[in-house]
Image (tube, helix red, strand yellow):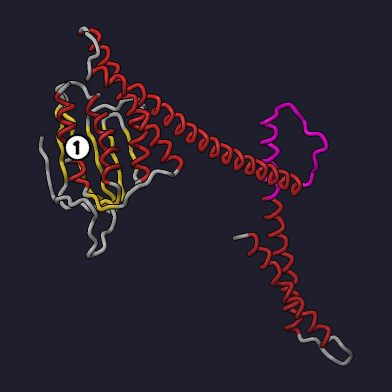
Amino acid sequence: MRIAHRMFLALLPAVLGLFTVSGLAYWGRFERQVPGSLLLVAAIATVASLVIAWRNTRHVAQRIERLAEDDHAAGESEAPGVRKTGASSDELEALERVVGQVSAAEQETRERERAAAARVGEYAELLAEVSAAASAQLTQLRLPLHILLENHFGALNENQEEMLAAAQTGADQLEVELRRLREIAEIDQGALEIRRDLVHPGDLVLSLMPTLRSLGERTEVRVRADIEPGLPRLLGDWTRLQEALSLLLSDRVRYAPSGEEVAIGVTAEPGVVRVAVDRGAAHAATADLLLARRLIGAHGGEIEEGSTRTVVTLPARHVPSGFRASGKTPSDNKTDEG
């Protein structure tokens, strides 16, 4: 029973006693006789009031004492061997002190969360600025490399050409990494624009299969896709979702043991579509994987990673009748056995 109910219940005999006293005041006058039933009601109300008040008072007192003892035990565990000076014997003061400490701790936690959020925003802004500046400087480096490789102003031997080609390849890869870092920063800042088109998840995975198979052939890894028929549509950005799945699946295929088969399954459950990768191997956290997680999260999805299985869950959208997706016209019910 709640404390408020106990307190209100304790008031009922008092209300009945008030009416009883009023009756006694009326019938207790000269030449009037108090009815026996009224005296009986008065006696019952008095005893009931005493019993209920005693039980409720004892219950509340015991609860307060237990709370105060818990606070005292917590204080001793935090500072063993140290005795509090000027400690009050009033349990309510102890509880008030605890409530004050909890409020102060909650306020401090909120301030730390605000400071952490502001710091993350500063880091994202700094990352975006540094990536943009580095990309601009990298463009100035790539241009002369391209000119030297395409237009020979003098005789270059094989080693020189190989070094220039390696420098150009490294510059191109660095440009890709910087672009992905910029996208991560934009997502964290909420500045990345996400389209909302109807996307068929089966077609999304099938569009990646040639790249994944070509990647697997380098290490003799077989890639197979099983796509459940009748999949619901996703409401999202085709390009962004394709990029996220490409980064994630390519990582699993690239680091799979030689000779292994990587199975990609696309299934539907109530309200969601799951893209599961069985076998394969996950690499350490890189800009590619961080960007994939950010893009999946921007579409309301999540990634569950295990030792031998990775599952991407994306929310399926209800398509109103007569709605037509812009740009994409995916086909239905496909199964790819590679």
Query: In the picture provided, is 68 more to the left or to the right than 140?
Result: right
Along the line of sight, the residue nearer the viewer: 86 or 127: 127
Q: Residue furthest bottom?
A: 31
**Horizontal and vertical percent position of residue 192:** 39, 43
Residue 26 in the image: state x and y as whole percent. 82, 87
The one of 196 and 222 positioned closer to us in this rendering: 196
Q: Which residues are magenta?
A: 64-90
Residue 269 in the image: state x and y as whole percent: 25, 50
Secondary structure type for disc 1: loop
Q: Where is residue 139 shown, x and y percent of the image?
A: 35, 26
Tell me if 59 is positioned left or right of 150 in this view: right
In depth, the one of 308 and 249 nearer the eye is: 249
- Identified at 76% across, 80% down, the residue is 20
For badge 1, the amino acid type reads Leu
Query: Magenta span has 66?
Result: yes
Q: Residue furthest front?
A: 153
Q: Please give the name of the residue rendered at 72% of the width and 77% of the height, measured from the top-left corner.
A: 16
- Judging depth in this view, the residue of 126 and 143 nearest the camera is 143
Q: Residues within 10 Å of mark 1 (few under 14, many from 20)?
A: some
Against 168, residue 97 (above or below) is below
Residue 6, by quadrant, is bottom right
- In what quadrant of the picture does the C terminus appear? top left
To which residue does mark 1 refer?
208
List the single residue furthest toward the left. 337
Residue 37 vs 249, above or below: the answer is below
Is 6 rendered above or below residue 197?
below
Q: Residue at x 70, y 45 (%)?
A: 100
